Each structure stands twice: as C-alpha cells, then as structure tokens.
Amino acid sequence: MKPRRTDEQEFLAELGRRVRHGRALRGMSRKVLARVSGISERYIAQLESGEGNVSIKLLRRAAAAMGVRVEDLLVDRPAQDWPIFRDLLGAASPAQIAHARAVLTGEAPAAGPVAADRVALIGLRGAGKSALGRLAAERLGRPFVELTKEIEQAHGLSVAELLALYGQEGLRRREQAMLREIIARPGALVLTTGGGIVAEPVTFELLLNSFVTIWLKAAPEEHMARVRQQGDLRPMADDRDAMAELRAILASREPLYARASRTVDTTGLDVETAAERLVAAITQGQ
C-alpha cells in the first residue's frame, strides 16, 4: 500500500499538473519552454512531476514564457471563467463595470444573438482551417479572412518575429486587438484563427460571442501528417516526442474547442468532401 501523500506533496503535484497543462494548452514542448524561459528542461520536468523544491523566481519565469500569471499556477480558482472576468475587469471603464454588474444581477439585458453569416473556424494546426475555409468562402461568396495574416500585414512582421520582439503576452495582445478590428467590420465573412487562440480567455470569449464558431477536428495522426506535409513542425521541431506533445496539446485544448457552436470532423476525408461538410455546417439553419 502506497503511503498517503502529504499536503505539500499534493500541492506540488497539482502545481506540476497546472504547469504541464498551461504548456500544452499553448502548444509548447518542454524544449521550447526551456529555450524561451531560460530554465533547464530538467528543472521543468521536475516541476511538472511535482518533485524537488520550487523556486518562485523560476516559476515566475516559466509563467511569463507561457503568457500566464504566476498566481494562476499557485491558487485554486472557484470558477472556470475567472481569468476572463479578471482580465476584462482590469481593462473596463467604471461605466462598463456598472453595466456588467447590472447584467449579472438581472437588471439589464444581455447581448443579442450572433449573426449567422459570420463564421470563425477553430482547431489545431493541421485541421485544414485555411484550405477548407478558403474553399467554403469561395463557394458561399463571402470574404475570407485569416487572423494570423491580418496581424502580420498590420505590423509588417511574421508571427515568429513578433513573438521574438514582444514575447507571448505581446503577441496575444496584438491578436486580440486585430480580432476586435475584424469584429467591427460589417457583413458576412469566414474567419480562420490560430490553433492557440483558445488559450487566451478574453480573446476566445470575444470570438465565441461574435461569430458562429466551427471546430475543425481530426485524429492526432492526421494532424501530424498534414503538418509534416506542410514542412512546418512549430513549435515541436526536432522534438523526438513530437507526437506525444501533439496529443497533450490536443487533450488540453479539446474542452475549449468543444465550446464551438458546431463541429466538423475531417478525419479520413479528402479535401472536396471535407469542404462540402464545412459548407453544410456553415449554412446549417440558414
């Protein structure tokens, strides 16, 4: 019979799980997190397994590299939506806070329904968001917008360059700002997003509240095969455990992807069939 773990051991085990979940949610391998944070892979492995002493300085660096707050790794949160409320309240005006309070207490009406002809595609890299989204938009006669390319064009830099210059947090701020710009554009459209958008609570909530969202999903093996065909293994390049990392990323993100209004599974489908199913999902109920 195994000895019962102490409270301290339980705390370290839970802390390790949160670090591992946060890393996977953002699509980062241990190798990438070590490079960005300047912390050794060995320390990260010990941290995630709940072993050894935890340095608050190193934990703070790991949190910053992942673009999360260190307190979210340390403290239990009673509500899943707490990060959304916290970040929105931090940026809200007194009038907005008063209105939010009125909505929550039932004194004011909530926002209206999302326009049915404004669609956003979410899903892991390799799901076919760009290829299928473009085909669906052409067949429906709607503008096709890629959030990542809009960010790159606005700043004259690639995502990799923006990440190197401003870090994870800076890139996510620019992603949210560009999403707000796109939301303000009138009319129908088909929008594709980066796979990691679900890891940013406020940005993802904006997306869910402004578009009919469709999760393009596929089996992990197909995700990996498609990414390799594209010659792009970011952020898992040269990682011997790339498939295990991809499975961990998908497992961490699946509950968030599942919040989409609709789902299209592209596993085993050719491009033509997958595009037909996506068009059917977009026009569902119209």
Image (spheres, rainbow, N blue to C red):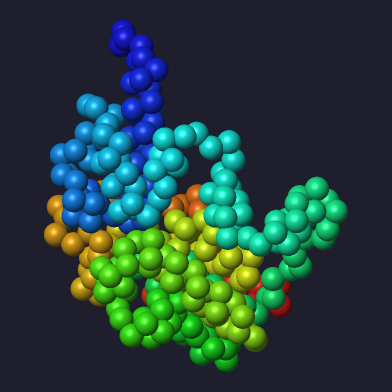
Image height of 140 relative to 13, above or below: below
Q: Position of residue 161 (x, y in %)?
A: 26, 74
Asked whether residue 267 appears in the rendered view, the answer is no
For the residue pair 90 and 13, the one nearer the viewer reads as 90
Residue located at (43% from left, 40% from top): 71
Question: Residue lying farthest right?
Answer: 107
226 over 30 or under it: above or below: below
Left-right relation of 48 to 273 = left
Q: Is 58 situated above or below 145?
A: above
Task: Identify the residue at horizontal 33%, vertical 27% (top origin).
Answer: 12
Q: Is residue 205 above or below residue 160?
A: above
Q: Is residue 87 left or right of residue 47?
A: right
- Please state the horizontal and vertical placement of residue 266, each as a whole percent of the image: 43, 67
Position in image of residue 244 (x %, y %): 26, 48
Specify the quadrant of the image occupied by residue 259: bottom right
Q: Nearer the viewer, residue 243 or 8?
A: 8
**Residue shown at 58% from the left, 83% from the top:** 189
Residue drawn at point x = 30 percent, y = 53 percent: 65
Query: Which image quarter: residue 223?
Result: bottom left
Expressed as whole percent of the image width and height from the top left, the position of residue 227 reads 27, 68
Q: Nearer the viewer, residue 60 or 135?
A: 60
Quarter of the image where the C terminus is located: bottom right
